[in-house]
Image: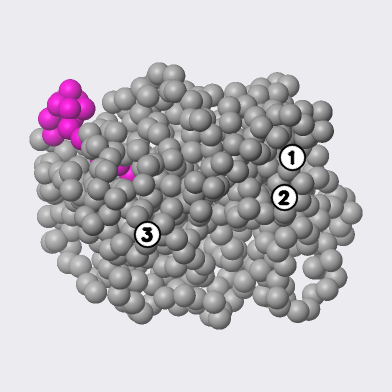
Amino acid sequence: MTKPIREKTIGIVFLLSCLLFSCAEQKPSNSEDVAKPPNIVLIMGDDIGYSDLGCYGSEILTPNLDRLAKDGMRFKQFYNMAKCNPTRSTLITGLYKGNDQAISFVPLLRDAGYSAVISGKEHFDKWVPQDCYFAETFEKSFTFWATTEYFVPPSGEFQRPFYLNGKEVSPDEIEAEILPKYKTDFITDLGLKWLDEMLFKDKPFFLFLPYHVAHYPLQARPEDIAKYRGKYRKGWDEIRAARFERMKEMGLLEEDVTLSPAGSNTNRFRGSSHEGWDDIRAKWPTYYPWESMTSEEQDKKDLEMAVFAAMIDRMDQNIGRVLNRLEQAGEMENTLILFFTDNGSCPFDSNVSFDIPPGPTESYRCLSPPWANVGNTPFRLYKQNGHEGGANTHFIAHWPSVIEAGQITEQMGHVADLFPTFLDIAGIEYPETYGEKTTLPLDGQSLLPIFEGQTRTETPFVISGHTERFRMYREGNWKIVRENGGDWELYNMEKDRTEVNNLAESEAQKLAELLANYETYRKDHK
């Protein structure tokens, strides 16, 4: 691996700056830019709730994402697959569920002349074939699998390896401009290094930055935590109510939308295998009022949310670095920038260090369910659930040459739509065969008509929820969903976005109709 950026000579850095300035000065006019295939920058968060961004109602500072939203488009309804690995599997293949005939969109972009690099998290379902993995498909890749700690080297026991172009690298080999090494920062460091290289090529580029923020463990730089310490002493009930009102003021929620009752958002699935802390764990699956805690307990919960906010803040700072680099190169106008999150906020009890406060590298802590409930305002439930709290998160699209600024769209999108969207804007036909494979029909459809201000033909159905125990199936405004293998529920999403009025009994015929349609899909996708 090359030496860290900080060790490169001033002369090289100066030359690079001059060349970038020269490229920006010599760029053709906007009309010529639009005629070229657009660049694509895809940025993905991890376990960040619908309302955890400033532009979606949060008090967390996200000025760079807010800017993309202000100058671009926000979706009210954008579905993922409700958990880290199935969302990434659907993203890269365009399929809700596939097999060894699945292909990645990345080689198709590269065949069409795109450069493609990735720096960030990798995590797929078992059905995704190896030839869709990042080291196999991107020109350059820096990855880690599933959950890793943020400070490197870590002090905990759960750090998985990092890989450069498919080969394991030690912590000492990781490039970092800021010490101590922090994952969100050095993911961006390497992504920007490779972006600089792509900017010198006379070809469009695809940059993928799947950050790990804000997946547990809760670890953040002290200066970022300090910005939020004490801001959450007012408690989760008041913070949630304030976010709900801001979302209405922003136009993200209609006036008649009901805030889901906090007490209905229990977490009845996952617990930790680590023993101890019984008094704390007794509260973990449940919501409980802020006022029921002592002042000391409230202070600990304030710190927990301050660290979570700091992690998102740091991610937004790094997104700002990417936007600055694109502006310096004169590439903002003809670059499609997308941001979304793989699922809703997470209340899983994977804590292993209740005796160490969240924040430093020595700790390994998770977000409490009532704070995760705040993140998923105004919806019910959490990560892995097919209910809106797990399956519906924010989606921001910014593309100045195509997307009119300041829009909030009512039209629905899904992560499965990204594969055909990328092919559409790059002018690529989806192949019936690729290599030795006969390809599978894609489950999504292009978002380009929505970006262009048109009404897209509605997708026949969408699917989410992690495994059959938490499955969601939606046709138009009607949605069926189950929680942890329980009875199927039915909701009219046009009238009841927060799923507080289960119509399974009063609309039994509609429930049976959707169940039959879903079973037909399942039979065709074994």
Membership of 449 in magenta stretch: no
Cα distance between the residues tagged 1 and 2: 9 Å
The residue under label 2 is which amino acid type?
Glu
Residue 39 drawn in magenta = yes
Residue to which mark 3 is pinned = 100
Horizontal relation, residue 496 to residue 427: left or right: right
Q: Which residues are magenta?
A: 27-45
Q: Nearer the viewer, residue 60 or 270?
A: 270
Residue assigned mark 2? 483
Determine the residue positioned at 18% across, 58% down: 13
Task: Tell us which disc is closer to us: 3 or 2.
Answer: 3
| Mark 3: few/some/many CA within 10 Å (<14, 14-19, 20+) | some
Tell me residue 292's x, y (percent).
Answer: 89, 54
Along the polypeptide, which appears first: circle 3 or circle 2?
3
C-alpha span from label 3 to label 2: 30 Å
Which residue position holds label 1? 489
Question: Which numbered disc flags the more N-terminal residue, 1 or 2?
Answer: 2
Q: Earlier in the sequence, mark 1 or mark 3?
A: 3
